[in-house]
Amino acid sequence: MCLGIPAKVIRVENDRALVSIGEIEYEANIGLLEEVKPGDYIILHTGFGIEKVNEAEAAETMRLIREIEQGLPEKQDGTIQS
């Protein structure tokens, strides 16, 4: 099983893109995708864009990830138990 995170494309240069997930920016390889432009949303997995999604799908996925994260038990030191 893999986990892909929605990311918003900020800038595109050849097969690389600057993307943001919340307040954090990453460099992503978008060579597997066609016609990616600033403002698009992609699913990011291990540094690679693997799928384009619309804004509503990206928002719903992030909502579900936050919901899962909130349900995980924390250890006494504040880290999440696995």
Image: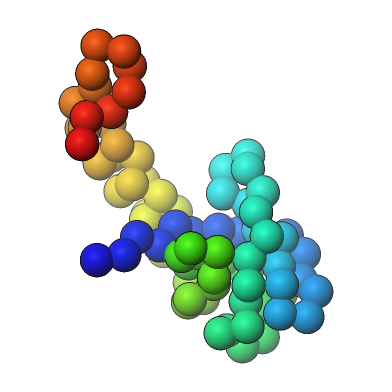
Q: Tell me where residue 33 appears, x and y as whole percent.
A: 57, 84
Quarter in which the N terminus is drawn: bottom left
Q: Tell me where residue 57 appears, x and y as whole percent.
A: 41, 64
Direction bottom: furthest residue: 34
Residue at the (65%, 54%) spot, across then down: 26
Direction right: furthest residue: 13
Quarter in which the C terminus is drawn: top left
- Rendered view: 40 above or below 73: below
Q: Tell me where residue 34 appears, x and y as whole percent.
A: 61, 88
- Asked if residue 68 lies left or right of residue 57, the reply is left
Res. 39 visible in picture: no
Res. 68 visible in picture: yes
Residue at the (71%, 79%) spot, across then down: 15
Residue at the (57%, 43%) spot, across then down: 22
Q: Tell me where residue 80 appears, x and y as whole percent.
A: 28, 28
The residue lying toward the viewer, choosing from 82 and 5, is 82
